[in-house]
């Protein structure tokens, strides 16, 4: 009998990351990022190099790497890969935790401005 819940799937983690970064589902870049993972039903724990995969798919959706929402979606994806129990925390808190973890609390200026526009303080 398992003592812990099953780990979420990669698609579920990416879905949560996109929901947090785009609650109104209006960002086409984030929608494309989500589509790239929609059929990835393997447990998040089975994904090798999650950080590299998330970053690569964000770059495919935004080759110039200028979209802070995509940068944060990849950061949240990576964060939740290691902190699976935090998948249900409120969005602003999840953004804060992911930014602190993935950027050592010092995100790139465009990401910092994007977070600030959403009321997320690091």
Image (tube, rainbow, N blue to C red):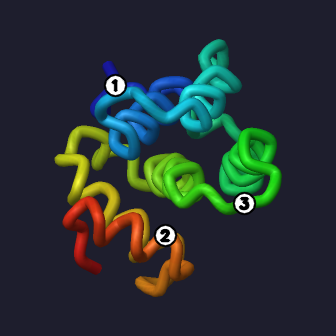
Above or below, comparing residue 18 to residue 54 in the picture: above
Which is more N-terminal, label 3 or label 1? 1
Which of the pair 120/117 is nearer the observer?
Answer: 117
Residue with the most extreme top position: 39
Which image quadrant: the C terminus?
bottom left
Does the rendering let one see residue 11? yes
Which residue is located at x 56 percent, y 79 percent?
108
| Mark 2 or mark 3, earlier in chain | 3
Image vertical order of residue 89 relative to residue 109, above or below: above
Q: Which of the labelled discs sits on residue 2, or is there none? A: 1
Q: Tag 3: Cα neighbours inside 10 Å, few (<14), some, or many (≥20)?
A: few
Q: Secondary structure at mark 3?
A: loop
The residue lying at 73 percent from left, 48 percent from top is: 62
Disc 2 or 1, which lies upstream in sequence? 1
Could you say where residue 7 lies in the image, as x and y percent from the top left? 44, 31
Q: CA distance from mark 2 to mark 3?
A: 11 Å
| Residue at image point 36% right, 34% down | 19
Mark number, residue 11: none
Q: Which residue is mark 2?
A: 111
Q: Are marks 2 and 1 in contact (CB under 8 Å)?
A: no
The residue shown at (46%, 25%) is 12
Q: Is residue 43 visible?
A: no
- Between 90 and 81, which is closer to the camera in this rendering? 90
Determine crowd level at label 1: few under 14, some 14-19, many 20+ residues with C-alpha closer than 10 A: few
The residue wearing badge 3 is: 65
Q: Is residue 107 above or below residue 20?
A: below
Please name whichever residue, 110 or 99, is drawn nearer the observer in this view of the structure.
110
Of badges 2 and 1, nearer the viewer stands 2
Instruction: Give the left or right position of residue 103, taking residue 115 as reference.
Output: right
């Amino acid at each position: 009998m398992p003592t812990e819940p099953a780990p979420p799937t990669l698609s579920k983690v990416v879905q949560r990351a996109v929901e947090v970064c785009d609650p109104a589902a209006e960002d086409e870049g984030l929608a494309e990022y989500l589509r790239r993972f929609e059929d990835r039903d393997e447990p998040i724990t089975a994904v090798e190099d999650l950080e590299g995969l998330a970053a690569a798919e964000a770059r495919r959706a935004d080759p110039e790497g200028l979209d802070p929402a995509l940068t944060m979606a990849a950061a949240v994806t990576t964060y939740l890969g290691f902190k699976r129990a935090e998948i249900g925390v409120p969005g602003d808190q999840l953004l804060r935790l992911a930014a602190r973890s993935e950027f050592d609390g010092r995100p790139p200026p465009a990401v910092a401005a994007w977070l600030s526009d959403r009321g997320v303080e690091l």
